[in-house]
Image (tube, rainbow, N blue to C red):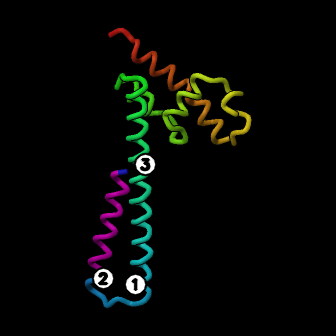
Amino acid sequence: MKKLILVVLMVVGLASIASAEEPKTLKRLQQEDQFQKVTDSFNKASTALDALVKSRQSDCIKAIGYTPFCDCILKDLPVAWEFADYIAITTRSKEQNGYDKLDAEYRAAYDKVSPIRDKCVQRINKKP
């Protein structure tokens, strides 16, 4: 994420230097407009991702109340799932969750949840 921001800032810097040296043409204005649209889309996506991460963290802490476990679970939990989905996947059967109706990508994400939970339980319960 930081690398992407750095690249965006470098492109902005280069664009501002280039625009100071040459008069703005229609093509240049269109390029700047397109760049602004890409930047705006990136900002919206970044904001949405931040909100999702905070929501998942908050939901986990409210339900589990143990930050090390939540950090472990949320580090690897596929983005396809909110924390409530994690609870449903780990407490209900595949049939109850409509597993057969999921497309291949969601089934793959679904299948990762229980091993993530098992890994985190082992890590938390490991004696020092």
Identify which residue is drawn at 41% across, 23% down.
64
**Callout 2 crowding tier (Cα within 10 Å): few <14, some 14–19, many ≥20:** some
Amino acid type at circle 3 is: Leu
**Callout 1 crowding tier (Cα within 10 Å): few <14, some 14–19, many ≥20:** some
The boundaries of the magenta stretch are: 2-18
Lower position in the chain sequence, tag 2 or tag 1:
2
In the rendered view, would you say 100 is above or below 51? above
Identify which residue is drawn at 66% across, 23% down.
93
12 drawn magenta: yes
Image-based side of 119 in relation to 17, left or right: right
Q: Check disc 3 and report the residue beneath it.
A: 49
Image-based side of 116 in relation to 92, left or right: left
**CA separation in Å, label 2 and label 3:** 32 Å
Identify which residue is drawn at 59% across, 36% down.
109
Q: Check disc 2 and report the residue beneath it.
A: 19
Residue 74 position in % (x across, y down): 44, 33
Q: Check disc 1 and report the residue beneath it.
A: 28
Q: Quadrant of residue 27?
A: bottom left
Main secondary structure along the magenta-highlighted residues:
helix
Q: Residue furthest right?
A: 100
Amino acid type at circle 2 is: Ser
> Is the Cβ of the residue at disc 2 closer than 8 Å to that at disc 1?
yes
Please state which of the two labelled residues, at mark 3 or mark 1, is closer to the viewer.
3
